[in-house]
Image (cartoon, coloured by chain):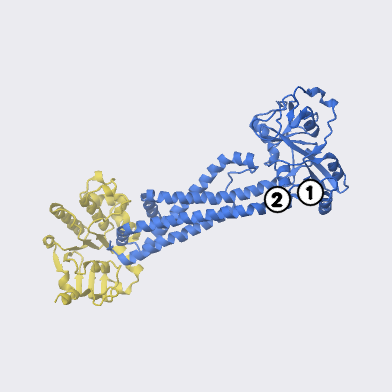
């Protein structure tokens, strides 16, 4: 069986740096995994996300997304894998300010034919699919036609989640998506996100520095513990 | 590609207030560049269209350009006349096929009055050797008959058999009137697009007749000769302003010109219209070149402004670029996005600039027509103008590559997490 994410002996070093900032001997994630990745600042979290997204390339070792080995692919090919198979949700300011809610959600379908066609298999039009996701994420329909800049941070994050989920990518990577929300909203958002990932059978990699959120996930991983670069440095 | 275009346009629209000022600079520069080019070509066209088939223009000695300007284009005034005797002597040369005497100096509501003979309607040609044709009526026969150019009739609303009076001197207001000698409209010429359209034609005799009771440019006080008595006087012309001469054989033009220039009894000048026009262009050329240079500089300023604005906005947009990357945009896509955005502003500038020029042309055309004899037309874009616009677009594209390249670099540098 092909893993959704498979990392072997990954080493990454920024240009002009003496020591690597990421050195992960092994990491696997399968479909159905809901992984809480604990990543305090300085643990190489952003770098790992860049590598998983294919915008950075490793010095040695390999990263495979659904069996595609990034070390064997060109930048453009990696961009394509990211577009087709990975949905990202960031901390905040996830939306393009000059696009409508629906247009923001549909962005991945503009860059990936695969996700476009997948979105069209679940609904008869792209807009209905976007709207279906929005209602499942419990965003009030009165907000759908608002400029995105008028939405609260929590509402914006739901739109971002809908964008990550549209076209059913196999991997959802969420980078501190709840850090700008208060505790109640964090819980609600997390529940919605987990439910939707389950529904879409997507693997979720949830990165946070807040261990209190870890309870609802079925795997919990400490980035510092799997990253030898950090352990060696701190040891 | 289509969605990038849409994205770029939406992004530009989102930044419309910042971009509108640089857009304005580009619009003005396009208008200016195209306007100078259009004025140049239409002036050339208009001037060379005004006369055809005439081998020599003869008048009292002055500069070549000057003689052309007043004799053919009715711009400026003659300082000296030539005598009728000299005119007769020159045109009696066996090499001369035809000639048109011209007497200028009076006007009618700002339109020049031209005294001539019926030879004018037969031999004057314009454009591609087209002859004058009558829209209505025919050539003048009686002393107080007049033939109007098409625009005179149209602007003043004159019809056949209408009566008009002429003013002494050129100008619009405050001129003494030849009020006691009204003229009857007996003919209206078809439109030519030349100064003929703005001319009131009367016979040479009529020029003498209206000045019979005048002394030193004013009506003689207490003395008036009624129109019905003028025929008792000798109305044969004594002087004319200039003459248009056609030769039997064009090859003789240098000989006849030399004869005119060496005429012993009075200082005369003969010019070949083509040569005089060429001289005129040489004078005007310097002005044209500098206007073009200034316009080109305005273009550069406008486009630099565009680059500056888009580049300045780019730093605030690093988050936006990272989001686009996360949803699958390649660095190349972001390069395209920013380049298209700049190009979009340039194209809008060109479109608005062309529109502005057309509007200006419509409003300014009557002024340039009456003051400078240049018929500006809100014409479709000529090939030369198209080349100009294409090069402008090219420079716009080059300028837009700068923010495009910067976005590309930022995309590679920032990846998914911009360092702001």
Chain identifier for the yellow-coloured part of the image: A
Q: Colour of chain B?
A: blue
Which residue is located at x 48 percent, y 49 percent?
B27
Position of residue B354 measured from the top left corner of the image (x, y, whole percent): 52, 48
Q: Quadrant of residue B5?
A: bottom left
Q: Earlier in the sequence, mark 2 or mark 1?
A: 1
Q: Is residue A175 above or below residue B47?
A: below
Q: Is residue B132 above or below residue B22?
A: above
SS assignment at label 2: helix
Q: Point out the image quarter for the C terminus of chain A.
A: bottom left
Q: Nearer the viewer, residue B270 or A199?
A: B270
Mark 2–mark 1 distance (CA, rounded to whole Å): 14 Å
Q: Is residue B287 left or right of residue B412?
A: right
Position of residue B318 measured from the top left corner of the image (x, y, whole percent): 31, 60
Q: Is residue B346 visible?
A: yes
Q: Quadrant of residue A210?
A: bottom left
Give the residue number, with chain letter if any, for mark 2.
Answer: B277
Label 2: chain letter? B
Q: Point out the image quarter for the N terminus of chain A.
A: bottom left
Which residue is located at x 39 percent, y 56 percent?
B310
Give the residue number, with chain letter if any, for mark 1.
Answer: B270
SS assignment at label 1: strand
| Residue A229, label in figure | none
Q: Is residue A3 left or right of residue A77?
A: left
Which residue is located at x 87 percent, y 47 percent?
B93
């Amino acid at each position: 069986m092909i893993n959704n994410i498979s990392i072997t002996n990954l080493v990454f070093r920024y240009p002009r740096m003496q020591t690597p900032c990421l050195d992960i001997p092994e990491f696997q994630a399968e479909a159905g995994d809901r992984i809480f990745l604990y990543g305090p600042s300085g643990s190489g979290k952003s770098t790992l996300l860049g590598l998983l997204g294919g915008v950075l390339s490793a010095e040695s070792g390999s990263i495979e997304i659904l069996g595609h080995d990034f070390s064997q692919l060109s930048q453009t090919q990696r961009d394509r894998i990211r577009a087709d198979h990975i949905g990202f949700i960031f901390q905040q300011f996830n939306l393009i300010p000059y696009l409508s809610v629906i247009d923001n959600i549909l962005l991945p379908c503009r860059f990936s034919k695969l996700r476009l066609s997948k979105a069209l298999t679940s609904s008869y039009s792209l807009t209905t699919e976007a709207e279906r996701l929005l209602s499942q994420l419990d965003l009030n329909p009165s907000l759908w036609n608002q400029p995105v800049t008028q939405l609260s941070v929590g509402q914006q994050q739901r739109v971002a989640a809908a964008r990550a989920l549209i076209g059913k990518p196999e991997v959802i990577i969420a980078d501190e998506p709840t850090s700008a929300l208060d505790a109640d909203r964090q819980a609600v958002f997390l529940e919605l996100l987990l439910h939707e990932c389950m529904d879409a059978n997507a693997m979720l990699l949830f990165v946070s520095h807040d261990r209190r959120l870890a309870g609802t996930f079925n795997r919990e991983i400490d980035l510092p513990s799997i990253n030898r670069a950090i352990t060696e440095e701190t040891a | 590609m289509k969605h990038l275009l849409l994205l770029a346009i939406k992004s530009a629209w989102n930044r419309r207030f910042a971009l509108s000022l640089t857009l304005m600079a580009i619009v003005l520069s396009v208008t200016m560049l195209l306007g100078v080019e259009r004025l140049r070509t239409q002036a050339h066209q208009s001037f060379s269209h005004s006369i055809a088939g005439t081998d020599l223009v003869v008048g009292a000695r002055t500069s070549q350009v000057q003689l052309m300007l007043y004799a053919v284009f009715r711009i400026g005034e003659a300082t000296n006349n030539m005598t009728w005797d000299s005119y007769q002597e020159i045109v009696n040369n066996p090499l001369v096929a035809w000639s048109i005497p011209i007497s200028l100096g009076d006007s009618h509501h700002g339109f020049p009055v031209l005294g001539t003979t019926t030879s004018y309607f037969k031999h004057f040609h314009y454009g591609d050797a087209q002859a004058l044709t009558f829209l209505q009526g025919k050539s003048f026969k009686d002393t107080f008959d007049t033939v109007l150019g098409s625009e005179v009739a149209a602007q003043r609303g004159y019809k056949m058999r209408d009566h008009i009076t002429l003013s002494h001197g050129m100008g619009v207001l405050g001129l003494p009137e030849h009020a006691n000698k009204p003229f009857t409209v007996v003919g209206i010429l078809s439109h030519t697009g030349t100064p003929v359209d703005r001319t009131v034609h009367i016979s040479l005799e009529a020029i003498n007749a209206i000045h019979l009771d005048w002394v030193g440019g004013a009506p003689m006080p207490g003395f008036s000769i009624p129109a019905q008595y003028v025929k008792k006087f000798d109305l044969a012309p004594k002087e004319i302003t200039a003459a248009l001469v056609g030769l039997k054989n064009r090859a003789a033009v240098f000989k006849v010109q030399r004869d005119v220039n060496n005429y012993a009894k009075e200082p005369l000048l003969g010019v070949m219209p083509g040569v005089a026009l060429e001289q005129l262009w040489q004078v005007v050329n310097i002005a044209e070149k500098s206007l073009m240079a200034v316009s080109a500089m305005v273009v550069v300023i406008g486009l630099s402004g565009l680059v500056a604005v888009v580049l300045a906005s780019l730093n605030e947009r690093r988050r936006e670029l990272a989001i686009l990357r996360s949803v699958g945009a390649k660095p190349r896509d972001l390069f395209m996005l920013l380049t298209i955005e700049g190009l979009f502003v340039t194209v809008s500038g060109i479109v608005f600039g062309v529109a502005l020029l057309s509007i200006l042309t419509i409003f300014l055309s009557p002024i340039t027509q009456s003051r400078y004899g240049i018929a500006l037309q809100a014409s479709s874009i000529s090939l030369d103008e198209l080349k100009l616009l294409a090069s402008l677009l090219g420079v716009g594209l080059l300028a837009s590559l700068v923010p495009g390249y910067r976005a590309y670099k930022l995309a590679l540098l920032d990846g998914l997490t911009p360092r702001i």
